[in-house]
Amino acid sequence: MRKPWLNIEHLTSPSGGCPYTGPDEVRSYKLALNLSTKDNNPNGSHPPKALVLPVSKDALSLQYVALINQRTPLVPVKLTLDLGGQFQWVDCEEGYVSSSYKPVRCRSAQCELARSKSCITECYASPRPGCNNNTCAVLPENTVTRTGTSGEVGQDVVSIQSTDGSNPGRAVSVSKLIFACGGSLEGLASGVKGMAGFGRTKISLPSQFSAAFSFDRKFAICLTSSSSNAKGVVFFGDGPYVLLPGIDVSRPLIYTPLILNRVSTASVYYTGEPSSDYFIGVKSIKINGKAVPLNRSLLSIDRIEGTGGTKISTVIPYTAMETSIYRAVTATFVKELAKVPRVASVAPFGACFNSTNIGSTRVGPAVPQIDLVLQNSGVFWRIFGANSMVQVKSDVLCLGFVDGGLNPRTSIVIGGYQLEDNLLQFDLATSRLGFSSSLLFRQTTCANFNFTSNKA
């Protein structure tokens, strides 16, 4: 959707597009970003080794919402966390006022990093954030509604807390963080002004923070299952990641490669763009140790079309599976739970049970374990009852997976509910995912980061 007051000229595709690799490329990347930082500590100290961001769960939309301070003067901005989002985007059309906002000019180094292929040659309204002449444009996507718009690339101040891994510390800021002014707020949680993109691009928030503060190109998410006042946590940088009562959940982790899908999975994109989503190589699925009969070709990414495979999402609330996979998983699960009476299905779920006949364990309802088998039979992501079963009524539990349709772009999309109270670390330098499985086994949860103490 093009803004009616913008005249956009399409440019020749810039070079690049894949994540940077070698040391020379990293140096040129940092120069192109032109990020400057400020340590809000009058006594001075070493640069932060990591940053921390609180994330809450919205009860109505089931979205995970981060709070970031942006602009001059600083304003708290609510953003829906989008793990595969290409960049941060903010609705600038109402009330975006900042003395430090700078539009990114066409054909600049920052414009190329944003993979912009078009230029706003003329804005027919008065100059303001989101409406400036000779600025590069991108396609901010609302991944909840799968809609894209055009938007201006800009830079502004962002402030975030540092951390030693155990406590929040002093505030630090990036003075020229690249983001997009634009996007549709339809379908986003109440009060949200945009989306925080964490995807595989050079201007995602993890990429920019690691470049600005020169720490490890890693980030970790730990989403809370509670939609009350509890807060989950995102860490930028390496561990330790310490949750009360003093448990470093950054170790031990199970590791699996992150797979690059060379075809974009966005709703709006230019030909030749790779996907910014994080894919993993699920090879098979087991329930109670028994293999689920699947068409395994659906588990691979088609090299030409980019279809198939398995990706991780914080935007969809429950794991969605291609219809044949969903039916096979549901049938096998129901067979393994045959002694528990089924009840009428409750949308959007297909298999529901009388919960009075299901016991409880430390890791949730006592139901069959679901294993996503990865690079070999010894490496698997085990999903326990806390992440597989959804309490829809006082006496009804449903299997928390949904039918993704006959021809989805991605065969399995692991949704937010299955990620809750699990730590996931994304190592961008080595293209590797580390995951903990349920933290309930370790007698802690993602709501247990000590945000109330300030010692770092």
Image (spheres, rainbow, N blue to C red):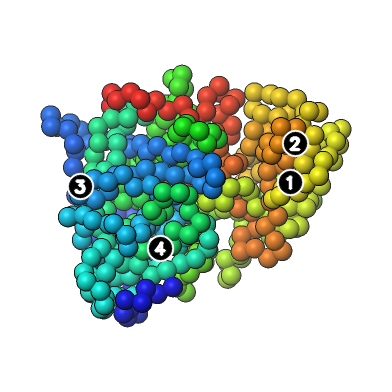
Which kind of residue does numbered mark 4 sit on? Gly
Residue at 32% from the left image edge and 63% from the top image edge: 93
Q: Which mark is residue 202?
A: none
Q: Position of residue 241 (x, y in %)?
A: 42, 30
Q: Give the secondary structure at mark 2.
A: strand
Q: Give the secondary structure at mark 4.
A: loop
Q: Which residue is mark 4?
A: 183
Residue 15 appears in the picture as rendered:
no
Which kind of residue does numbered mark 2 sit on? Val
Q: Which residue is mark 1?
A: 346
As measured in the structure, the alpha-carbon distance from the residue carrying label 4 to the one carrying label 1 is 33 Å
As measured in the structure, the alpha-carbon distance from the residue carrying label 3 to the one carrying label 2 is 49 Å
Q: Give the secondary structure at mark 1.
A: loop
Q: Earlier in the sequence, mark 4 or mark 3?
A: 3
As measured in the structure, the alpha-carbon distance from the residue carrying label 2 to the one carrying label 1 is 9 Å
Q: Which residue is mark 2?
A: 396
Q: Earlier in the sequence, mark 2 or mark 1?
A: 1
Q: Earlier in the sequence, mark 4 or mark 1?
A: 4
Residue 420 appears in the picture as rendered:
yes
Q: For residue 54, what is the image quadrant?
A: top left
Q: Do callouts 4 and 3 mark residues in contact (Cβ within 8 Å)?
A: no
As measured in the structure, the alpha-carbon distance from the residue carrying label 1 to the one carrying label 3 is 47 Å
Q: Earlier in the sequence, mark 1 or mark 3?
A: 3
Q: Is residue 188 left or right of residue 121?
A: right
Q: Give the secondary structure at mark 3.
A: loop
